[in-house]
């Protein structure tokens, strides 16, 4: 069966990186977060594009992702691992020359026992209570950690997409208290923190979602476009139903286009009966339930049914589609499945 076409505009992605980079002063390094396969966009392609254009530091969640990025960017860039130095991962950390962000005294001990002298960073918990050393944990081992010369100390904001949330200032103060005066580079801001302003930038900012065209970076350029092939068109009469659970019942003679993509492709079931697809500039309502591989769309009002309908396009961003389903753009992007035909615009041609 035909599959959808997911077009990823690497030039738009690079423009987003440059626009974010321009928001911090020249002394602040702008890194790139490429975890979760670069938010579903393809970590190898995305990291290569950015590295060729001067990005020096990348962040991923785990060492498997780090190995993919290392392949793409070559030996030079720094690749940080948010999950740190997990048990059993030493060989991969060494082989791909990854820099784990150590989250506990236990991880620190594991790292120095296994890979003394190998680069590492430290992740502190400044109030999110998710990952990283708590103030007391850090204080207990701080002098030893500093002797081993960490490459970076980071922490992460819980509420940076809400500029007025009091937790931003509270975490900023905690991060200062934990790190002021230490001879180590520091990083606190992801996309949201970067947009909060220079106080939050420290030595390195690490945007993810903003690179991929997502909120809270409202000035981003769209990076993804998703077109889905129409595989069948049928006419139904008043009172006939469509799809699982007979969830849609026609109130007028209705023309239905069946489109080849479903919840197995990241178009989650919560979109059922709510989302909109686009035939050029004309909106077409998704009707009935989203199935695993198929969607049904009301195309009654179209003069001509096109070969494809768009679901991520100039009329509908990942954030807008997400809002329909009660989720966030991050979840829509990272759920886009492996079955699409992926087309990269602006890809770097690798020398063979
Ligand atoms: C995912 C993540 C980022 C990037 O966040 P965005 O909101 O996508 O910019 C930065 N730092 C940490 C610790 C993360 O987990």
Image (cartoon, rainbow, N blue to C red):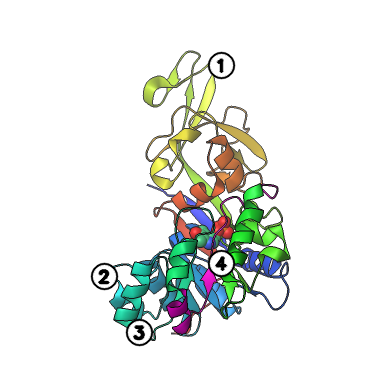
How far apart marks 1 and 3 lie (CA) works out to: 72 Å
Mark 3 in CB contact with mark 2 (< 8 angstroms) = no
Q: Which residue is mark 4?
A: 178
> Is the magenta region chiefly helix, strand or loop?
loop
How far apart marks 4 and 3 lie (CA) works out to: 24 Å
| The disc label shown at residue 88, or none | 2
Is 66 on the left-hand or right-hand side of 186?
left
How far apart marks 1 and 4 lie (CA) works out to: 65 Å
Q: Quadrant of the C terminus?
A: bottom left
Q: Position of residue 248 (x, y in %)?
A: 47, 21
Q: Position of residue 307 (x, y in %)?
A: 53, 44
For this rendering, which residue is in front, 321 or 1?
321
Specify whether tag 4 is near ligand 1 (CB below 8 Å): no
| The disc label shown at residue 252, or none | 1
Residue 221 lies in what quarter of the image? bottom right
Q: Residue at x 63, y 54 (%)?
A: 170
* Sequence order check, earlier mark of 4 and 3: 3
Mark 1 in CB contact with mark 3 (< 8 angstroms) = no
Element under label 3?
loop
Q: Nearer the viewer, mark 1 or mark 4?
A: 4
Q: Nearer the viewer, mark 1 or mark 2?
A: 2
How dense is the environment of label 3, judged by Cα within 10 Å: few (below 14), some, or many (20 and up)?
Answer: few
How far apart marks 2 and 4 lie (CA) works out to: 30 Å
């Amino acid at each position: 069966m035909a599959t959808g076409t997911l077009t990823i505009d690497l030039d738009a992605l690079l423009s987003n990186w440059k626009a974010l980079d321009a928001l911090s002063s020249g002394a602040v390094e702008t890194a790139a977060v490429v975890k979760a396969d670069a938010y579903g966009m393809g970590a190898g392609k995305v990291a290569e594009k950015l590295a060729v254009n001067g990005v020096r530091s990348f962040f991923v969640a785990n060492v498997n992702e780090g190995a993919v990025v290392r392949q793409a960017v070559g030996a030079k860039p720094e690749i940080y691992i948010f999950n740190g130095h997990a048990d059993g991962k030493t060989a991969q950390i060494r082989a791909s020359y990854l820099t784990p962000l150590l989250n506990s005294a236990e991880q620190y001990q594991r790292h120095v026992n296994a890979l003394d002298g190998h680069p590492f960073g430290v992740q502190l918990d400044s109030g999110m209570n998710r990952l990283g050393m708590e103030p007391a944990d850090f204080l207990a081992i701080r002098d030893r950690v500093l002797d081993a010369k960490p490459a970076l100390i980071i922490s992460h904001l819980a509420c940076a997409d809400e500029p007025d949330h009091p937790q931003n200032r509270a975490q900023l103060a905690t991060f200062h208290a934990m790190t002021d005066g230490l001879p180590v580079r520091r990083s606190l801001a992801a996309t949201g923190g970067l947009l909060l302003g220079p106080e939050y930038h420290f030595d390195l900012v690490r945007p993810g979602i903003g690179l991929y065209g997502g909120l809270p970076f409202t000035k981003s350029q769209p990076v993804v476009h998703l077109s889905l092939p129409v595989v069948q068109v049928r006419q139904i009469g008043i009172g006939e139903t469509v799809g699982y659970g007979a969830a849609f019942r026609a109130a007028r003679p209705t023309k239905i286009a069946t489109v080849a993509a479903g919840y197995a492709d990241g178009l989650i079931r919560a979109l059922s009966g709510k989302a909109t697809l686009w035939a050029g500039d004309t909106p077409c309502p998704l009707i009935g339930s989203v199935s695993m591989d198929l969607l049904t769309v009301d195309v009654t009002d179209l003069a001509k049914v096109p070969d494809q309908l768009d679901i991520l396009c100039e009329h509908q961003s990942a954030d807008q589609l997400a809002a329909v389903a009660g989720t966030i753009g991050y979840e829509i992007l990272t759920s886009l499945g492996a079955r699409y035909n992926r087309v990269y615009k602006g890809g770097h041609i690798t020398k063979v």
